Structures are given as structure tokens and as C-alpha cells.
Amino acid sequence: MRQDEVSTRIRAGLERDPRINLHQSSVRVSRIGGRILLTGEVPDVITKRLILSSVQLMIQDGMGCEDRLNVATIERGDLELNQLVASHLIDEPIFRDCTIAVHQNGLTTLLRRPSLDSGEAIEVSVSEGVIHLGGRVHSLAQARIAEVMCWWIPGVRRVDNRLEVTEFDIDSDGELTDVVRAVLEKDPLVRGSGLQAASAAGIVELRGCVASQEALQVALSDTWAVPGVWDVVNRVEVAA
């Protein structure tokens, strides 16, 4: 199948997906060699993940998909975003053993180096609202939570997460469920709501009750923001 035919077929599939409203987005689908490239802008991280999930189901075996979709958000300077991301990571207890450094305008600033060097380090750089995470962390959970924390910052358009995991860590339903639960508990907008999460093959089911429609939207967005989540089944009730 020719490149333009593949792109056209995928675009048509996205237009048929009832979960996705392409009229609210400017999504471009192209084929470069053996992979599909997604570019453009979408309204939120949920739409971004939905599009990627839908495309993954449509592409042929052996064909990769690169997601460069940006999220529409407020404008914020790269320097400010860099400082905010680094500050959030420094304040998060699970990164207390990590060296934190930022790169900006050709300069590297070391913000924290623990007294006992664990070999873990997170390097942050920002370019036109895109957060680049590099370095090494101990666990897959840390890599996932670092990305979610970036998405919590208004002004972030995309997260390029290239964190390496230093120890062998099996990507399992249990691990993914633990991360989703941890993320929901860390977000002050849904913390304490008692939401329950379970996952199977990357599909996460949420149950419980929240106080408002806004809290529900936050919980859904938090769950979709976790790398490795391919679908979310919403069984959460909103209190009357």
C-alpha cells in the first residue's frame, strides 16, 4: 500500500472513531518509512492518547507510530516551564535520590545532587513548550510519574520522555495499576476520593464516586496521562 493510501486510511479511521472529534484538532497523519508520524495540535491529553491508541490498532504489524501531537494550552516561556518542572520533581519524594539538572540556552545547571550518589539523574530541557526528560531512574513507575507531573503544569504542550530505567522492571498490569493509583492520590483535586483502579492489557477501569464533574474530568485526564494506558473504562459516579 502506498504511503498516501496508508495515511488516508488511518485518517478515515480516526474520523469514524466516536471517541474522537477531529473538528476540534488539527491532526496530520503521514508515513515515513516503516512508521506513522502524528503531528498537529489537540485540545487535551485525553484526545492525544485516544488518537495514538486508535492509530496503534489500525497500523500493520511491525509498523511503528511516533506521536508528536501537541496539546493546546496557555503560553508560557521555556525558562519558566523548565524551572517549574524541575521544582515539581525536586519536591516529589519518589525522586529524592535523583540528581536533578536543567539544560537551557546551552547551559547546564545542577539543581540537586544527593549526598549518596544512586546513579539516578533526571535532566530537563524545554523547547517551545515541549518538555524533554532524559537520564536514568530506578523504576518504570518513576519514569511514568515524572511524565504525568509534567502534564500537570499549564503551558506544557508535549512531553518527550526518554528516561531510562536502570533496573530490570517488568511492565505488568499490576505495575500500571499501582502507578495510576499513585497518580490519583498525588493530585489534590481528586486525592481522598477513594477512587479504585484496575487494569488489564493497558485498559484501566476506574470505579468510585467523586464530588463533581470537574473532579471526574481530572481523574480521567490523570489516568490517560500515564504512559502505557491504552484505554480507560469510566465507571465513576458523580455525587448528586
Image: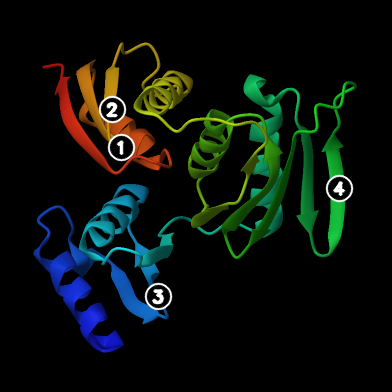
Q: Are marks 3 and 1 in contact (CB under 8 Å)?
A: no
Identify the element where label 4 is drawn. strand
Q: Which residue is mark 3?
A: 34
Amino acid on which the number 4 mark rests in the picture:
Thr
Amino acid on which the number 1 mark rests in the picture:
Gly
- Dot 4 or dot 3: first in sequence order is 3
- Dot 3 or dot 2: first in sequence order is 3
Residue 16 sits above or below residue 210 on the image? below
Q: Residue at x 26, y 67 (%)?
A: 60
From the viewer's perspective, is the residue at label 3 or at label 1 nearer?
3
Identify the element where label 1 is drawn. loop
Amino acid on which the number 2 mark rests in the picture:
Ser
Q: Which residue is mark 4?
A: 109
From the viewer's perspective, is the residue at label 2 or at label 4 nearer?
2
- CA gap, disc 4 and disc 3: 38 Å
Q: Are marks 1 and 2 in contact (CB under 8 Å)?
A: yes
- Dot 2 or dot 4: first in sequence order is 4
> Disc number at residue 199?
2
Asked if residue 161 lies left or right of residue 11, the reply is: right
Label 2 Cα crowd, 10 Å radius (few <14 / some 14-19 / many 20+)? many
Q: Quadrant of residue 160?
A: bottom right
Q: Which residue is mark 1?
A: 202
Taking depth in this image into account, of 81 and 62 the one nearest to the observer is 62
Label 1 Cα crowd, 10 Å radius (few <14 / some 14-19 / many 20+)? some
Q: Position of residue 19 (x, y in %)?
A: 15, 52
Q: Position of residue 183 (x, y in %)?
A: 44, 26
Taking depth in this image into account, of 148 and 121 the one nearest to the observer is 121
